[in-house]
Image (spheres, rainbow, N blue to C red):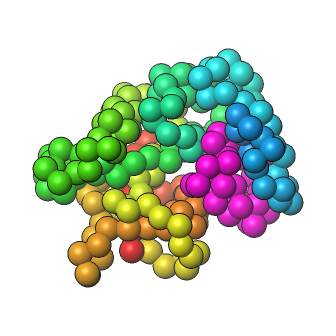
Amino acid sequence: MKIAIAGASGRAGSRITAELARRGHTVTAIARNPEKIAALPNVTARKGDVLDQAGLAALWAGHDAAISSVHFLDSDPVRLIGAARDSRVGRYLVVGGAGSLEVAPGVRLVTTPNFPAQYKAEAEKGGAFLDLLRQEKDLNWTFLSPSALFVEGERTGKFRLGTDQLLIDPAGKSWISFEDFAVALADEIERPAYPHRRFTVGY
């Protein structure tokens, strides 16, 4: 498949780019500083600005899927969704956040007392992004939330999937590596199971 990813030089984006390349997909890797994108087979680095809706739409056009892997506070969900719509890309996938996941019915993680203050604004904007996507009728979108801890680690290929509830392992930890998150996202692109939905991945 032909897949474009904005934010390809980031911690999650670089792993997603590598995973897609590993699977033989043709990847357009987009970043403000394309020289930071690792040289990989089937990967073409391109310069792009996620705040430039028209420019991003042009970069995404002609692809089977487009991915946003950018910080919510450094981007504008209205422009990103607009770029996906304008590009007429087949699918639009968003690297989401954990803050909008529920820890009890109707209770989002970001609203709990122990949620780290330094991540609250980012998490709230991620939740707003998801709310905007849920209003989209025509765009074929998917929002993948990581677990609470999103960390560097290993590619094991062994994880659980959920929908709107935070996943917690038997030890009480909620976590996923960037590498396994990339596997889950690539799997969803190849075998769509969550169109027009959010899902989550964790151990």
Reply yes or no: does residue 20 show up in magenta: yes
Reply yes or no: does residue 198 show up in magenta: no
In the image, taking residue 10 as reference, residue 33 lies left or right, namely right
Residue occupying image coordinates x 61% and y 49%: 10
Residue at far front of view = 118
- Which sits in the foreground, 171 or 107? 171
Q: Does residue 191 appear in the picture of this structure?
A: no
Task: Count how many numbered circles sit on residues in the image.
Answer: 0
Residue occupying image coordinates x 66% and y 55%: 14
Q: Position of residue 8 (x, y in %)?
A: 67, 47
Residue occupying image coordinates x 56% and y 44%: 69
In the image, taking residue 102 as reference, residue 73 lies left or right, namely right
Q: Position of residue 127 (x, y in %)?
A: 33, 38
When asked about the image quadrant of residue 58, the answer is top right
Considering only vertical position in the picture, is 191 above or below 65? below
Name the quadrant of the C terminus. bottom left
When asked about the image quadrant of residue 42, the answer is bottom right
Q: Does residue 126 appear in the picture of this structure?
A: yes
When asked about the image quadrant of residue 136, the answer is top left
Q: Position of residue 155 (x, y in %)?
A: 58, 75
Residue occupying image coordinates x 77% and y 33%: 47
Q: Position of residue 185 (x, y in %)?
A: 55, 58
Which span is picked out in magenta? Answer: 1-27
